[in-house]
Amino acid sequence: MAAVILLIEEKTMKKATKTNTAIKHPGMGATPDAKGVTFRVWAPHAEKVYVTGTFNDWSKTSTPLSSEKNGCWSAEVPGAKAGDEYRYMIHTPVDWKLPPLSHIDPYAKKVTNSIGNGIIYDPKAFDWGSDNFKMALRNELVIYEMHVGTFNVKAEGHPGTLDSAIEKLSYLQELGINAVEVMPVMEFPGDFSWGYDPSHPFAVESSYGGPDAYKRFVKAAHEHGIAIIVDVVYNHFGPSDLDLWRFDGWSENDKGGIYFYNDRRSHTPWGETRPDYGRGEVRQYIRDNAMMWFEEYHVDGLRWDAISYIRNIEGRDTDTPDDIPQGWSLMQWINEEIQQRFPGKISIAEGMHNNAWVTKDVGAGGAGFNAQWDRGFVNPVRQAVIVRDDTSRDLGAVSKAIERRYDLDVFRRVIFTESHDAVANGRSRVPEEIWPGNVDSWFSKKRSTLGGALVLTSPGIPMIFEGQEFLEDRWFQDKVPIDWSRAEGENGILNMYRDLIALRRNLSGLTHGLCGQNIHIYHFDGGAKIIAFHRWDKQGPTDSVVVVVNMTNQNRDGYTIGFPRAGLWKTRFNSDSYNYGPNFANHPTPDVEAHEEKIDGLPCSGKISIGPYTVVIFSQDK
C-alpha cells in the first residue's frame, strides 16, 4: 500500500508528534515496536482521525492518522510506547454537526477501566518460558466452571482477581480438575459482573488484574496440568460503557452504527447491540478476538455464550424468517480456522436447543463446534434428584439423558447439574433445592451427590460449577464469594468428588470404560427406581465399567443384575461410604462374583447390595 505523507505546519501543533504513515503492521489497534507504535483504526465515515494520549500531552490535533482509502486510518508514532494511555479523536462530516468523538480503541488490549482510556500494550513482552502445554483429550476432560470475581476473594467489598485464583490451582489439581472454564474476563462496566456484558472485548477486565494477570493465570494453570477455556460473548456487546456504539458517528434507524446491525436484527434480550455479522470488518473483528485468546493468551479453548442469538434474532432454533445466515457462517469460519491452526484445542457452544448441527463438521454444513452444553441432560437429571417423592422420580427421563449423544459422538456434549445459569436468576444450588435452608441434611447430601455421580459417570464431558464439590448453598451472585469454609466442613463430599473424578479420568487404570464412547442401559426397574448401565471402550478387563444407581431411600440387598463378563467385579466406588459423610449408612456393597447365567440381556449375572440414594461402580482387574 502506497504511503500517504501528510504535511502539518508546526504552528498548528500544541506539541508536534512526528508521524510516518508507511504502515508496517497490517493488524488493527496499537502495535508497539522498537521505533514506536503503529495506530490503526476502522472509521469509514470519519473526515479526520487523530490519536491523543500521554505521549503527546493529550493533544487532540497534533497526531493525525492518514486515511488508507478503505475505511481504515493509520499512522506510526515514534514518540509512543507501551504503557502510554491513548484515545482516538474522530471528526465526522461537517454537515452532521457533531463534536469530535473521543473513543477508546476497539482493539485496545488493556484499559484503565471501562470508561477510561486505552493503554498501549505489548503482547510479546510476557515471558511464557517453556509453556508447551497439551490439553487432555476430550474423552478425558473434567471441567470446572469458575467466576474469577467470586472464586477466591481476598478483600471484602472487592472482587477476586486472577492472581488470587492462582492460589487455588493446587486445590483444583488435587481435586482432579484438568480444565477450567473461566466465565468472561473481557472488560465490563464497573468491578462486579457475570462478565456477559463486554464493553471492550479485546481487553482483560482491569479489576481482575488485566492482560498480564490473565497470562500469569494461564501459565500457572498449565504448570498444574490444567487447561483454560475462556468464555466469549459474541451474541451482543455491552450494552453499557460501550465505545463501539456509533463509533464514527454514523447510524441508521436510531441504532448502533458500524459495528452493529441497524435494522431489526440488532435486537437481543440484552439491548440493541447485536454485531453486524454480515459486514466484513465486524466479522474480522470477532475473528481476530477469537484468535487472540489462542495466539496471545495460550488458552486451550473457547466457550461461546448463547450462540442461538448469533444464528437467530429471537434465539430460536427453527424460526427461519428470523435466522441470521451470516452468524452461522461466522461461527463456521472461526471454528474451522481454530481446528486448522490450533489442533487439539476445543470450541464449545452454549446452544441449549439440542441441535446436532451445532457440532457437525463445517464440511457437512454444521457450525463446527467440538461440543455443546446439553440442556437435555441438566434438566431431567436435576429434576429427578430434586423432586421430594421417590415415586415421582422419572427414570425414563434420566435414562434418556444418560444415553443422549450428538452426531454419534458422546463427547460432543458437556453435561452438568450446576452452572452459572442453573444456580442463579431464581434457581438455587441443587442441595438447597432439595431441602431449602438445610443443605447439610442427609437428604441434600445424598441426592445432590447422586446427581454429581451421574454427571461423572454418564457419557459426555462432565462439568461442575465452583463450590459444587463442597455443597455451596448460596445461589450464584457476582458480589457473593463462594464460602471456602465449607471445603473443610464438607470434606467428605469433597472427597467423594475427588474419588469420582479420579475414576472418570481412569487415573487408577481400572475404569477406562468411563472414557469410552459406548453405553448400554441394560437394567431398568421403574418400581425399585434402579438403573444399571455398562460403559466401555473396547470391553474387557479394566475397560468395562458397570454403574448402578439407586434413586430411592431404601436399601437393596441380594438384588440381581446382569454383568457383561463372568468373574470378580470389584467395588471401586460406593457413594454411601462413611468416607463421604459420618451420617451416611455405609451400607455394605461387596465385590460381586458374576456367573454365566443370562439376565438383562447380558451373558452373566450377580447379586449386589446397594444403599439408599447411592451410586456404585464396579470393574474387573483382569
Image (cartoon, rainbow, N blue to C red):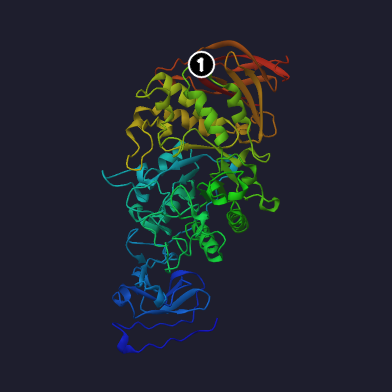
Q: Which residue is mark 1?
A: 390
Viewer-closest of 394 and 19? 394
Along the viewing direction, whichever of 283 and 567 lies nearer the viewer: 283
In the picture, the quarter occupied by the N terminus is: bottom right
The quadrant of the picture occupied by the C terminus is top right
Displayed quadrant of residue 284: bottom right
Secondary structure at badge 1 equals helix
Q: Image point 37% across, 55% down: which residue?
A: 240
Q: Position of residue 71 (x, y in %)?
A: 50, 73
Q: Position of residue 242 (x, y in %)?
A: 39, 59
Q: What is the residue that sits farthest to the top in this orientation?
A: 558
37 on left or right of 349: left
Q: Is residue 513 left or right of residue 251?
A: right
Residue 583 spot, x, y in % from top left: 40, 17
Q: Residue at x 36, y 50 (%)?
A: 163
| Residue in the picture at 43% in, 43% down | 146
Pick the residue in front: 71 or 153.
Answer: 71
Q: Residue furthest left?
A: 156
The amino acid type of the residue labelled 1 equals Asp
Q: Nearer the viewer, residue 268 or 212?
A: 268
Packing grade of label 1 (10 A; few <14, some 14-19, many >=20) is: some
| Residue 440, horizontal then vertical, whole percent | 37, 23
